[in-house]
């Protein structure tokens, strides 16, 4: 158990200090994506007096440049063409709003399911490749669930490095929740076993489990996860289990292949996209949603404790289009 830790670091204190509103920070975070996208779109639109096929081709190039991927781009532009035709639109300046609506509709179709703990107890298993932000996300999630009056337990099932356990312990301190950990090199499934026993005895609502981020295509990761699943099945079958994949927004299309890989060997219930602050590749959210149909549950926009929230499609699109509200 925890509490052998020294004071919080100065850096953490600074990161956790009160800041601008979430939407303001999201908008700033997505500025690079927005610039890549809406500013260029304004430029393109200015060059057209009427809507023609060349304009659609330019929009296609823009969407691909904003990391939306080929399939999603084709799909979106087809829908746009159709809308323009059926509504008899001729003014290019209206295109931006229509595009925003199309993108929003796609996200809402896949991304509405934001509630993570509709049933308790819930076990959340956080998976993902090295460095995407798993441990940090657990720290922020703990804080988020606490603010929703849930009792939280962290389980340090990334036993690969001692530093991983220490990092999670620091987060347990920052968000003031209990943590179960064992020594470096212990069997992750056995840490989860301990975690479940503790969660049951203390009536915890949410159990957040960190896992190691070794290469996702390695067979040992699959085996490790399967062993963890067996322990959860056996020890806490009544708990609501969610496996969430963390993806780093700055890796763009690479994140898509990670989603594909993980999705091929484990049942993913949702995605968490981190590092949307400062990523120019926020457009990757769109193909992610439509290609896998896995809802994005939360997004991270920084390293502070308040920098994680449930994903809201409308807010996200508004932030990319750098507008508080776009016209219907
Ligand atoms: N800017 C920014 N940095 C983030 C965000 N989330 C995580 N990070 C940083 O990304 C780095 C890696 O985060 P970790 O939480 O250690 O990632 P991990 O997936 O647990 O890494 P491993 O355990 O090594 O696999 C750290 O420096 C975090 O502070 C985010 O939303 N924004
Ligand atoms: Mg980690």
Image: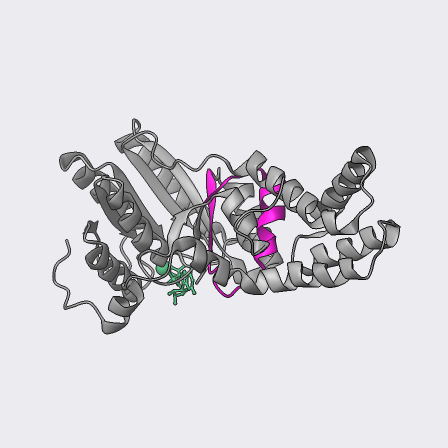
- Residue in the picture at 50% in, 47% down: 315
Q: Does 206 sit above or below residue 16?
A: above
Is residue 104 magenta-colored? Answer: no
- Residue in the picture at 50% in, 35% down: 112
The quadrant of the picture showing ligand 1 is bottom left
Q: Between residues 271 and 306, which one lies in front from this camera angle?
A: 306
Q: Measured from the top left, where is residue 225 in percent x and y?
A: 40, 44
Residue 224 seen in the current view:
no
The answer to whether 268 appears left or right of 50 in the picture is left
Q: Between residues 180 and 133, which one lies in front from this camera angle?
A: 133
The answer to whether 311 appears left or right of 93 in the picture is left
Q: Between residues 218 and 239, which one lies in front from this camera angle?
A: 239
Is residue 283 magenta-colored? Answer: yes
For the view shown, which residue lies furthest in the top direction? Answer: 238
- Residue in the picture at 23% in, 62% down: 170
Q: Measured from the top left, where is residue 179 in percent x and y?
A: 20, 51
Q: How many badges with numbers are in the image?
A: 0
- Residue in the picture at 49% in, 50% down: 219
Image: magenta residue range: 269-297
Q: Between residues 78 and 249, which one lies in front from this camera angle?
A: 78
For the view shown, which residue lies furthest in the bottom direction? Answer: 10
Q: Does 214 sit above or below residue 293?
A: below
Q: Quadrant of the C terminus?
A: top right
Q: Measured from the top left, where is residue 299 in percent x and y?
A: 45, 51
The answer to whether 76 appears left or right of 285 in the picture is right
Q: Measured from the top left, where is residue 95 in percent x and y?
A: 73, 48
The answer to whether 267 appears left or right of 46 in the picture is left
Q: Please, which colouring scheme is shown?
A: one colour
Residue 31 seen in the current view:
yes
């Amino acid at each position: 158990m925890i509490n052998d830790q020294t004071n919080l670091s100065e850096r953490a204190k600074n990161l956790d200090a009160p800041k601008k509103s979430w939407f303001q920070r999201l908008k700033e975070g997505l500025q690079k994506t927005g610039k890549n996208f809406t500013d260029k779109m304004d430029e393109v639109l200015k060059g057209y007096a009427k809507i023609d096929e060349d304009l659609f081709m330019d929009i296609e190039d823009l969407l691909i440049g904003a990391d939306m991927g080929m399939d999603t781009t084709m799909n979106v532009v087809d829908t746009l063409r159709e809308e323009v035709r059926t509504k008899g639109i001729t003014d290019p300046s209206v295109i931006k709003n229509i595009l925003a609506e199309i993108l929003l509709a796609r996200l809402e179709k896949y991304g509405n399911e934001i509630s993570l703990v509709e049933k308790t107890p819930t076990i959340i298993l956080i998976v993902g490749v090295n460095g995407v932000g798993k441990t940090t996300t657990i720290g922020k999630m703990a804080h988020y669930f606490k603010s929703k009056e849930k009792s939280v337990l962290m389980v340090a099932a990334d036993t690969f490095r001692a530093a991983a356990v220490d990092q999670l312990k620091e987060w347990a301190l920052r968000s003031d929740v209990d943590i179960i950990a064992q020594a470096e090199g212990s069997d992750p499934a056995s840490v989860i076993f301990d975690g479940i026993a503790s969660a049951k005895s203390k009536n915890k609502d949410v159990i957040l489990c960190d896992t190691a981020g070794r290469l996702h295509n390695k067979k040992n990761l699959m085996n490790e996860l399967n062993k963890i699943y067996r322990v959860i099945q056996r020890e806490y079958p009544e708990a609501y289990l969610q496996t969430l994949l963390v993806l780093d927004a700055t890796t763009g299309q690479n994140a898509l292949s990670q989603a594909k890989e993980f999705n091929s060997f484990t049942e993913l219930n949702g995605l968490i996209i981190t590092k949307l602050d400062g990523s120019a590749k926020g457009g990757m959210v769109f193909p992610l949603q439509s290609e896998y149909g896995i809802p994005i549950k939360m997004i991270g926009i920084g390293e502070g404790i308040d920098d994680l929230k449930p994903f809201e499609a409308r807010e996200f699109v508004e932030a990319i289009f750098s507008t508080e509200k776009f016209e219907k």
